[in-house]
Structure formats: structure tokens, C-alpha cells
């Protein structure tokens, strides 16, 4: 276990009823379409992944992942086309390179690398979307909430509380 | 990372989609939530947002309430983003100030728990509301279209599509990898359920292709490379050496007659290897183009350089035979592509217990088609490999289909072609024909009637899977007589043994050889079984995810000839609609470089798969040619200084979306 990220059990928190929040970045052509297919096929899966569409997994800036984690996500799922199938030829390979590097970085930052996951899911693999999200939800339940308390993160505080930033509308605090 | 946006007026529309969304997500609560979000001037729910009244509502609100941004929480943007962009545009709002939140496919349809579904829907709506604030009005760019279509595959699907396009006055390039067009249909004798002679209805179309002034036929050719995009594809075609000049040959066949091989010696693939051919041959008499082909594998001259070249002498002054010919490449600019690469008949060899390849009496259905064909290896006589006429014939259905060891899907045509084969075999030989089936699926026009007719003709039907095929009991010479088929007769509830002289395997249809390479070349998706995937199974059945590439025929999934022809015409109509509009709008999600922020590090340049990025030598910054950019955003993700950005997917917009999506617990 890392120094900065403690499992929920260690912190004495109950993981029961813990609903991990996953930010999912899905590429438009394969994985986003696959999750549409999962919907059309009425496959039921954990509601924990919230989906952000990008045109290509190659658009994924590793900072998106870091920002998502800092802003309260317990995990990040990245979905792209299978190797060789990228709509833009090789954006998914670029994503893979960044992902491998990012995972090392996460470990150094004390965040379990399992919190970030890359999956190749083609447009016809609606069931893979279900499996990936279900598996990841279960895995995050076991890991517990991501607690970044000991990392100085002014933005995290700023985002999670309805503090008004200069000229910038802030969402009403949710529940 | 403080991003500032001016205050804007957002309208949020939550769609019930009948009960599709409202049945799971509390749309009232969701709308009330949306109304509390910053910048939301108005939040409404409506039963069907995509309907006319739904769109009118949106348009009226834009005008009356001066809405500056729109969020529609409904289905997938892949389905209705265009609809709502159009509605906004009609009301005078820039269409790119609209954002959709997918609460149907991604929430209502996949979540059982109502409370959790509502929470997820709120998060998705909050994300869209947060993100849309930072949207900017964008201008669509238009690209002109090359009014020419390439059709890949010259079976009945490709032929039909090419003729329809050609008849409308458009130039068509038809590419076929075999020496002749015609595909599988040319191999058949009769077609179900009307028993039209396949050749009688197909060969006139093949000739029409050959003679059509607008169609250029490239036989023995394969697509080697595809570049470009909708409206302007650039295709490189490999033309394989035929060793006979199509221009000079008149199709007299003298070369075949005079070949040093006095009699045919090599298996003819068109006859499924049942018939023989010479090294120089026509696959079948009505082949189009009517030009023989020389097979380099078996031609003595091409193989060893030792031959009297009697074919060259026979050709004489025509001088059509050209042993110097080599594969060459031709390049074409086309606006649209129709992929009609067909299917492959399943090879039953791995299913050892059916004895295919072990017992000479076992045939695949395609082989029997050739035996029945008057132009086939036996001139239409149904005879076994030993020359005898079978008296008892068994037809086993669902070979490789509806079988989880091979293909779980139903191949759709096998029941009907098995009935047709049963009818034809009985008609030609008077044999007793037994069908071993799981279910008879005869749902087409006049199909059930044909099934009844075949039953009345005395064809037997045994419902059950065949478990074993063994040699029959020995005759007086100790030779086994025919085969014995062991079947679990599920209607009688017992295992039965049926002796037959000939066994026909009704094989599945599976993706054509090389389908995966074709799919990648044209940037399409495929279903898990390997058939090419249509953009939408109901509403875009001939489109693919790659705009300007359309599908026709069995490459998209098993289908019969009427369905194939209908789909080919649909694909032709779609291609026509595309290339006829002279110019098409492009999605403006291209990338650009903010010159002031660019440090000139050149990180982005090698990342671009389209070579759209170059370095301005004077300013020392990267420049993106937006006409080449396809909008993947790979360069944007890599830019260390944030100078590269992508319209509709700027860093700021994505950060906003992340914030929004996590703002709701």
C-alpha cells in the first residue's frame, strides 16, 4: 500500500454501499459505439461509469486522467479501438504509449495503477463494455475510495465545494 | 486552469423517449435538477424531443427565450445530434452550440436501479451543461465530391449496384478479384423459390456490365490501398497478370483448344474442383470478360520456360497472349465506395463426424450446385464420384450454422437452398431424398409454399441433428455400400439410422476470405462473426461508420439473392445521393495551432497520420492544414504547451466536462 492512498478499510471507513465513480473516456468509433450497442441490447451493468466521448483514444491527454482523479473520480477507464483498427490509423497506439507511462507515474504518486484501465473494445463488443465496467467497479470497491488528502490539491477543494471562482459559474452542490 | 466563460443562457431539454428513458429515469426530477444548474435559463422535459413538435418547441424557445446554448438529454449523439443541430440552426443558433447528454443508451437502457440511473443521468446532464458553456460558434467547411463510384466485388450485389449507378449516368469502377464477375450466383443452377435458372437471369446482367459505357470492369484485380475520405477517396488497385491482353483477345478460345495439354488436367476452382481445366482456361463458358486466363502455377512456359507455346501460334496475328505481362497498379479518384465482397461457403472438413473429405459420397452444397448446373463438370447430371447415380440422398442442414462450436448465427439461406437441392435432385434422379433439419426457416415471399411443394413431392424430413456418418454394410465383394447416417429423430424420440448413397452438407455462409483485411482497408467495423457492420441496423443498413463507404450483399451478413439485389440498389441510391450533391459539409472538429503558444518543438508533426502538420519556417511554429486534418486530436493530446487545440474537443471543454461529470456525487 502506498503512503498517500489508503484503502478504505485502513482508514476505518466502510466500503459497504460505496459507489465508486469512474470517468470513462470512450473513442467515438469503437468503444462509444459499443456502449451504445450495450444500451440497444439492454445489457445491464454497474451505473458507476460516466462517459465522456472523444473522437479517438489518441485525444486522451494523460492530464485528463490526473484531473479526473484529483476531482473525485475513483478510477478512470479508457476505451479505444483494437490495435490495427483505429479509425485514425494509429491513435490508439499513441494512447497505449501514454497509458503505460501514466501508470508508472501513478505508482510514483502513490495511486494504485489499477485505478486507471485501458480497454480495446470494438463497436460490436457491447458485452465487453458491460464486463469492463462491472469488473472495474468491483475492483474499485475492493480498493476503496481514492483519498488524495495528503496531496496538496487546491483545485480539488475548489471543485468539490461550491466556491465561486473569478467570473466563473459554479455548480450547485450536489446532495 | 481557471477557465472563464461569459454568462450564457442555456436551454436544457430532457426527452422521455416514450417510456424508453422515462420508464427508468425520473425525468421530472432530472429536469428540476437541470434547472438548478448554473447558466440554465430554461429546463424542459418532453415526450419525444426528436419529433416535429419537440423540435418546434426547441426552435420556439431559442427565439423567445434567446437561448444561446442547447443541451438535449436524450439518446446517443450518433443517432440525433444532427437532428438537434439542424433544429438549432433553423432557429438561427449556430449548430455547434448544441450538446447532447446520452441518457438512453448509456443510462436508461443499461441500469436497473432507478435511483442510481437518476444519479448517473444527472452527472451526464451536469457535464453537458458545464461543457456547452465553452462551446464556440463554428463554421462548416465544404468539400467538393468526385462524382465517381468504386464498387468492390463483382457478384450479384456488385453487378446490380454498378448497373444502377451506371444507368444513372455516373462513372463506375467495378473491381473483381476473380478472372470473371458473377460470384457465387454464377455457380448455381436454379434459384429458390421460383426455380429461375441462375444463368438466365444473371448472365444478361453480366453482359450489360461489360457493354456499359459508364462501367469500367477490372477483373483479376484487388484494391491495394485506400486513402482520402468521403467524397474524395483515392484508391490504388492491383491488376493481376492474366497473360492474355483483354484489348486484343476476341474470346475465340483457340488458345485453350491448342494448349499443349491435350486434355484438361487441373481442378477448376469455379467447379469446386469437381471439373478439370487446362492451364489456359475460362472459368465457365459465359465468363465476363470473355477472355481466357493463364494460370502461372500450371502453365509450362511460365513455370519452366519449356513449352512449344502452341497457344501463341493458335492466337496468331491477334497476338493477344503476353507472357511478359506482370502485375501492375492503377489509381482512381472516387467519391464513394460500395463494398460487395460477398461470402465464403463454410468448409466442413473440421467436422470429422460428417465424413467430408473422407468418404467420396459426402458433398458440400456448393459442389452439388455445380453437379446440377448444365454448364458444370457433369453437364448437369447428378452422379457420384464413381459415376453412379445415387438412389438415396441425405441433406444435412445447419452445417457450421447455429452451432456454438462454429458459427452461432443462422445462415438464413440454407433451409431454402436445401429444399431447392432436394427438389432438383429428386427431379433429376428420382432418388429418395431425406432432409435432416433442426428447424425449417422459410420466412420469405413464397418460401413456405415452396416448402409445402417439396413435401408434397415426397421429400422426407427428419427433425434432428446428425451425430455420425459411417460406411454402409459391405456388399458381396466386401465393399461398403453407401453410407449410414445416424440421427437423433427428435419427433419420434429415438435414434434412427438412415442409409444413403450421397450425403449433402448444407454449409453455412461465413465472411469471405480476406474480409478482415478488406475491413481495415476501408476503415469499417465488423460484427463479432466477422461480417461488416452497418452504421445502424435499422436506419442506416447500407452505411458504414466510414462515411462514403457503403455495403451491399452477403459481406454484411448472410442473405439471399432478392435481399442482396435490394440492398445493392439501396447502396447505389445512397452513393448516388452522396455524389450527386456536388459538395458535402465536413464535421468541423479539426485541430488548429495557437501560434502564440507554440514553442516550435515539433512533437506534433510526426504524430499526425495524415501529414496535416508542418512547420512554418519563418515563424518557427507548427501549422495544421485543416483540409487534411480528420479530427482525431492526437496532436492536441501531445502538445506540451497547449498550443494545439481541437474544435469541439478543446482541452478546456474536456476539463469542463470532467468537472461537470464529477460535480454530482
Image: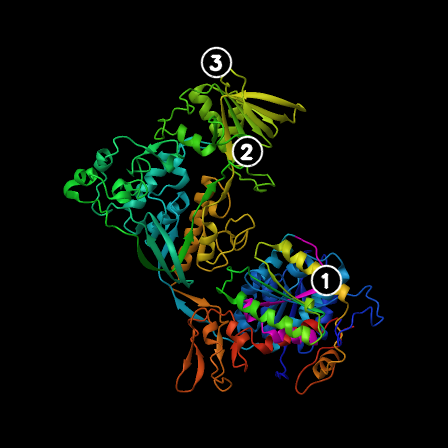
Marker disc for residue B477:
3
Q: Which residue is mark 1?
A: A137
Residue B437 position, x and y percent, is: 58, 30
Task: Tell me if label 2 and label 3 are in contact, CB under 8 Å.
Answer: no
For residue B225, side relative to residue A162 (left or right): left
Q: Which quadrant would residue A153 be assigned to in this image?
A: bottom right
Label 1 or label 2, whichever lies nearer to me, is: 2
Which quadrant of the figure contains the C terminus of chain A? bottom right
Residue B585 position, x and y percent, is: 45, 67
Taking the spot 34% from the left edge, 32% from the top edge, the residue there is B276
Marker disc for residue A157:
none
Height in image: B608 above or below B457? below
Q: Residues within 10 Å of mark 3 (few under 14, many from 20)?
A: few
Q: Is residue B50 magenta?
A: no
For residue B319, side relative to residue B607 (left or right): left
Q: Which quadrant would residue B581 be assigned to in this image?
A: bottom left
For residue B509, side relative to residue B618 (left or right): right
Label 1 lies in what chain? A
Marker disc for residue B352:
2
Taking the spot 54% from the left edge, 67% from the top edge, the residue there is A56
Q: Secondary structure at mark 3?
A: loop
Amino acid at each position: 500500500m502506498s503512503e498517500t492512498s489508503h484503502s478504505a478499510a485502513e482508514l476505518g471507513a466502510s466500503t459497504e454501499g460505496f459507489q465508486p465513480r469512474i470517468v470513462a473516456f470512450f473513442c467515438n468509433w469503437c468503444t462509444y459505439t459499443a456502449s451504445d450497442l450495450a444500451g440497444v441490447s439492454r445489457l445491464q451493468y454497474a451505473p458507476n461509469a460516466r462517459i465522456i466521448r472523444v473522437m479517438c483514444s489518441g485525444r486522451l491527454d494523460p492530464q485528463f486522467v490526473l484531473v479526473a482523479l484529483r476531482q473525485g473520480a475513483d478510477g478512470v477507464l479508457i476505451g479505444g479501438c483494437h490495435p490495427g483498427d483505429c479509425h485514425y490509423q494509429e491513435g490508439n497506439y499513441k494512447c497505449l504509449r501514454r497509458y503505460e507511462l501514466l501508470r508508472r507515474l501513478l505508482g510514483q504518486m502513490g495511486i494504485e495503477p489499477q485505478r486507471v484501465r485501458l480497454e480495446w473494445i470494438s463497436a460490436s463488443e457491447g458485452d465487453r463494455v458491460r464486463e469492463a465496467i462491472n469488473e472495474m467497479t468491483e475492483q474499485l470497491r475492493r480498493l476503496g475510495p481514492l483519498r488524495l488528502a495528503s496531496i496538496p490539491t487546491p483545485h480539488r477543494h475548489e471543485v468539490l465545494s461550491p466556491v465561486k471562482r473569478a467570473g466563473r459559474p459554479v455548480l450547485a452542490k450536489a446532495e | 486552469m481557471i477557465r472563464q466563460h461569459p454568462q450564457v443562457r442555456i436551454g436544457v431539454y430532457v426527452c422521455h423517449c416514450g417510456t424508453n428513458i422515462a420508464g427508468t429515469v425520473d425525468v421530472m426530477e432530472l429536469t428540476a435538477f437541470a434547472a438548478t444548474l448554473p447558466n440554465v435559463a430554461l429546463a424542459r422535459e418532453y415526450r419525444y424531443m426528436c419529433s416535429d413538435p419537440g423540435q418546434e418547441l426547441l426552435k420556439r424557445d431559442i427565439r423567445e427565450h434567446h437561448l444561446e446554448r442547447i443541451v438535449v438529454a436524450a439518446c446517443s449523439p450518433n443517432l440525433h445530434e444532427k437532428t438537434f443541430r439542424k433544429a438549432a440552426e433553423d432557429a438561427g443558433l449556430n449548430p455547434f452550440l448544441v450538446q447532447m447528454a446520452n441518457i438512453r443508451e448509456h443510462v436508461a437502457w443499461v441500469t436497473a436501479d432507478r435511483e442510481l440511473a437518476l444519479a448517473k443521468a444527472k452527472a451526464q446532464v451536469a457535464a453537458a451543461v458545464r461543457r456547452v458553456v465553452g462551446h464556440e460558434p463554428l463554421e462548416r467547411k465544404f468539400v467538393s465530391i468526385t462524382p465517381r463510384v468504386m464498387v468492390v466485388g463483382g457478384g450479384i450485389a456488385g453487378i446490380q449496384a454498378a448497373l444502377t449507378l451506371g444507368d444513372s449516368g455516373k462513372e463506375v469502377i467495378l473491381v473483381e478479384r476473380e478472372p470473371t464477375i458473377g460470384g457465387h450466383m454464377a455457380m448455381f443452377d436454379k434459384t429458390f423459390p421460383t426455380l429461375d435458372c441462375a444463368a438466365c437471369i444473371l448472365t444478361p446482367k453480366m453482359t450489360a456490365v461489360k457493354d456499359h459505357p459508364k462501367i469500367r470492369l477490372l477483373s483479376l484485380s484487388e484494391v491495394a490501398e485506400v486513402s482520402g475520405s468521403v467524397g474524395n477517396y483515392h484508391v490504388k488497385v492491383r491488376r493481376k497478370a492474366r497473360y492474355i491482353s483483354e484489348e486484343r483477345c476476341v474470346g475465340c478460345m483457340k488458345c485453350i483448344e491448342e494448349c499443349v495439354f491435350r486434355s484438361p488436367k487441373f481442378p477448376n476452382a469455379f467447379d469446386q474442383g469437381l471439373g478439370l481445366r487446362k492451364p489456359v482456361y475460362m472459368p465457365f463458358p459465359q465468363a465476363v470478360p470473355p477472355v481466357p486466363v493463364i494460370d502461372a502455377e500450371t502453365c509450362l512456359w511460365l513455370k519452366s520456360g519449356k513449352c512449344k507455346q502452341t497457344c501463341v501460334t493458335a492466337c496468331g496475328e491477334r497476338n493477344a497472349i503476353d507472357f511478359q505481362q506482370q502485375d501492375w497498379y492503377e489509381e482512381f479518384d472516387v467519391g464513394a465506395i460500395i463494398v460487395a465482397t460477398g461470402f465464403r461457403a463454410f468448409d466442413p472438413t473440421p467436422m470429422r463426424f460428417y465424413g467430408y473429405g473422407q468418404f467420396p459420397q459426402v458433398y458440400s452444397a456448393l459442389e452439388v450446385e455445380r453437379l446440377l448446373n448444365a454448364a458444370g463438370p457433369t453437364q448437369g447430371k447428378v452422379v457420384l464420384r464413381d459415376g453412379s447415380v445415387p438412389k438415396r440422398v441425405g441433406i444435412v442442414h445447419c452445417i457450421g450454422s447455429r452451432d456454438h462450436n462454429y458459427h452461432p448465427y443462422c445462415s438464413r439461406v440454407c433451409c431454402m437452398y436445401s429444399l431447392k437441392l432436394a427438389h432438383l435432385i429428386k427431379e433429376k434422379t428420382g432418388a429418395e431424398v431425406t432432409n435432416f433439419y433442426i428447424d425449417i426457416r422459410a420466412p420469405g415471399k413464397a418460401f413456405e409454399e415452396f416448402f409445402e411443394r417439396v413435401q408434397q413431392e415426397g421429400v422426407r424430413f427428419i427433425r434432428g441433428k446428425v451425430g455420425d456418418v459411417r460406411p454402409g454394410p459391405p456388399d458381396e465383394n466386401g465393399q461398403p455400400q453407401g453410407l449410414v447416417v445416424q440421427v437423433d429423430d427428435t419427433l419420434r424420440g429415438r435414434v434412427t439410422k438412415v442409409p444413403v448413397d450421397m450425403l449433402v452438407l448444407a454449409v453455412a455462409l461465413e465472411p469471405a476470405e480476406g474480409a478482415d483485411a478488406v475491413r481495415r482497408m476501408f476503415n469499417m467495423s465488423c460484427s463479432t462473426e466477422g461480417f461488416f457492420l452497418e452504421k445502424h441496423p435499422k436506419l442506416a443498413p447500407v452505411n458504414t461508420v466510414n462515411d462514403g463507404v457503403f455495403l451491399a450483399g452477403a459481406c454484411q451478413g448472410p442473405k439471399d439473392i432478392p435481399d442482396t439485389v435490394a440492398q445493392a440498389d439501396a447502396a447505389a441510391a445512397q452513393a448516388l445521393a452522396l455524389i450527386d450533391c456536388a459538395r458535402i459539409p465536413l464535421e468541423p472538429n479539426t485541430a488548429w495551432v495557437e501560434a502564440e503558444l507554440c514553442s516550435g518543438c515539433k512533437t506534433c508533426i510526426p504524430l499526425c497520420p495524415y501529414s496535416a502538420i508542418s512547420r512554418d519556417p519563418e515563424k518557427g511554429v507548427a501549422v495544421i492544414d485543416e483540409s487534411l486534418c480528420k479530427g482525431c486530436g492526437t496532436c492536441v493530446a501531445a502538445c506540451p504547451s497547449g498550443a494545439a487545440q481541437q474544435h469541439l474537443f478543446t482541452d478546456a471543454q474536456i476539463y469542463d466536462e470532467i468537472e461537470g461529470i464529477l460535480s454530482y456525487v
